[in-house]
Structure formats: structure tokens, C-alpha cells
Image (cartoon, grey):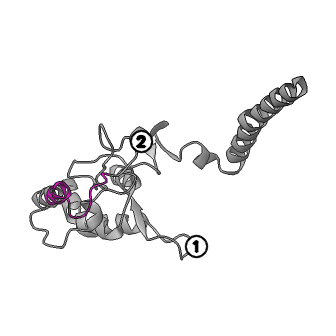
Amino acid sequence: MLTHVRAAIVSLVLFTVVTGVVYPTLVTVIAQLVFPNQANGSLIVKNGKPVGSTLIGQPFDDPKYFWGRPSATSSFGYNAGASGASNLSPTNADLTKAVQGRVDALRAADPGNTAPVPVDLVTASGSGLDPHISPAAALYQVHRVAMARKLDDAVVQRLVAQHTEGRLLGLLGEPRVNVLGLNLALDSR
């Protein structure tokens, strides 16, 4: 019996050290060597200070900025500690009301824009933290942003084109625009 207890304790200590210390340390070292930017949160730094991450959306509501996807995280929008969707079905009256409110807000911010509102500007992503919008969603906002910044629409359209990321390896995913990166490029003009 004593040998079984001793074997169990040795196994517990051994596996605690291997899975709780050695493996995490090894993975951390490899990540820091091979993917240092990603391992440190893919931070965007401006003037020596981190202003955000390429992986987590941020709220923008000023007309001079591009707006991202709505966030459905709890407590407050884009709460990285409470990632999640609203879990409302497409037929839910609350979701329909929220989407209509977002459409109305977009129309009010740019009354002359009669184009259909891209769905990613009025619906939250599954995580509620999506940092990207579709190129169509960015182009939908070009006139509003250009007017607010007193720029020509073509200048802002070129910025959108420059910040449009393609499919991974030309096959995977959809083209997308990182909202924070685009807004920072606008600010640096």
C-alpha cells in the first residue's frame, strides 16, 4: 500500500512539474523566439505607447473615424475579459430592434448614403471583439469619414484599399480591413 501511495505522489509531482512548469516554459520560449509580436498580443504602438491590438476591436463613434462591428460583450463593448455573442436568434425581436437602431444610426451619420448597409456594421461577431470589417463596410463609410475630415473621397478610398488585407495564402478567409490600423493611418495624415 505504501509503495502505491509513494508512486502516486511521485507521479503527481512529476506531472505537475512537466505539465505546469516545463511545458508552459518551453511553449513560451518558442513563441517568443518564433512569433514575438503575436506572443505579446499583436500590439500596435504609436509614439512609444501601445494604443491597441490588431486582434481586438475598439469602439469608435466619432464620424471622422471608421466604425467597426458592434460588440455584444457583457458589461461594456469590446470587453476582452467577457468575449461572447449575444446568443439572440435571427428572429428575436430584441436583435431586430438593435439591428434597426444601428442601421438608423448609420443613416443619420451619413444621410446622403442610400447604399445598402453592410451586415457586418449592424451585427456583432461571435466573439464580440472582431477588429476587422469587410471592404464593403469600409467603403460604405468613406464619404462620412471624408466629409468629417474635409478630405476628398478618393483619398480615403485609397487608404481603405491600402489597408485591405487579402485572403490567407490567397485561399482562406475573406478580405478584411483592420479598423484600428485604418483609423491610425487617417490620424497620421
Side of 39 relative to 167 (left or right)? right
Q: Residue 79, image x and y in percent? A: 37, 40
Q: In the orientation shown, which residue stands out farthest toward the front?
A: 1
In this view of the protein, which residue sits in the foreground, 18 or 44? 18
Side of 57 relative to 106 (left or right)? right
Task: Give the amino acid at mark 1.
Answer: Leu
In this view of the protein, which residue sits in the foreground, 22 or 31? 22
Residue ID for mark 2? 80
In this view of the protein, which residue sits in the foreground, 168 or 109? 168
Badge 2 crowding class, 10 Å Cα cut-off, few under 14, some 14 to 19, many 20 or more, is: some
> What residue do we see at 24% from left, 67% from top?
140
Task: Point out the image quarter for the N terminus.
Answer: top right
Q: Residue 27, image x and y in percent? A: 71, 44
Distance Cα–Cα, label 1 vs label 2: 28 Å
Residue ID for mark 1? 169
Quarter occupied by residue 5: top right
- Magenta region includes residue 98: yes
Side of 146 relative to 189 (left or right)? left
Magenta residues, as a range? 86-100
Q: Tell me if residue 44 can be seen.
A: yes
In this view of the protein, which residue sits in the foreground, 111 or 124? 124
> What residue do we see at 15% from left, 58% from top?
93
Quarter occupied by residue 29: top right
Task: Give the amino acid at mark 2.
Answer: Ala
- Magenta region includes residue 158: no
- Compared with residue 2, is residue 176 higher up or lower down, i.e. above or below? below
> What residue do we see at 53% from left, 76% from top?
171
